[in-house]
Amino acid sequence: MNTTQLKLQQSIEVTVQPRYLPEQSNEELAEYTFAYTVSIANNSEQSVQLLARHWIITDGNNTIREIEGEGVVGQQPDIMPGQSYSYSSGAILSTKTGTMEGSYKMRSFEGIDFNAVIEPFGLIHPSSLQ
């Protein structure tokens, strides 16, 4: 990774707010549904585009699923300097707890590709907090 890629990577801030969705879960069938809202802030001086996503989802049994695809929620958004982009999505686990982490493949408008890191975050059923 060159200096420009590193600077761009460090200038993209990804925050995630997960929540459990009891109304969409079926605990008798071990289907625990979680939603999460992601905010991607562009703190760089360049416009960037989100091209692809890579998620690593680990449930409470340490079963790992990887999900890769173009864009997010059907879009490949452009994020201007000082702006942010938010979206919501979800995941279904077979356990009450798990984690998600990953990265977004990004491209600056100058054509420089880099990855924006999605730090690990927890998917936690409320009863697991007691």
Image: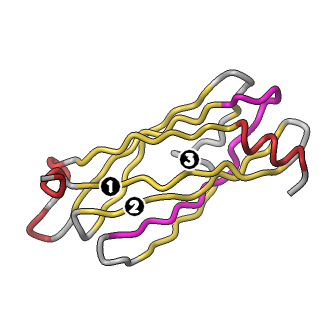
* Residue numbers of the magenta segment: 42-59
Instruction: Give the label on residue 99, or none.
Output: 2
Describe the element under mark 1 as helix, strand or loop. Answer: strand
Q: Which residue is mark 1?
A: 123
Q: In whole angstroms, how far apart are the C-alphas of marks 1 and 2?
A: 5 Å
At label 2, the amino acid type is Thr
Do tag 2 and tag 3 residues touch (Cβ < 8 Å)?
Answer: no
> Is 9 displayed left or right of 20 in the figure?
right
Count of labels in the image: 3
Do tag 1 and tag 2 residues touch (Cβ < 8 Å)?
Answer: yes
Q: Position of residue 83 (x, y in %)?
A: 65, 23
Q: Residues within 10 Å of mark 2 (few under 14, many from 20)?
A: some
- 106 shown above or below 66: above
Q: Residues within 10 Å of mark 3 (few under 14, many from 20)?
A: some
At label 3, the amino acid type is Val
Q: Which residue is mark 3?
A: 72
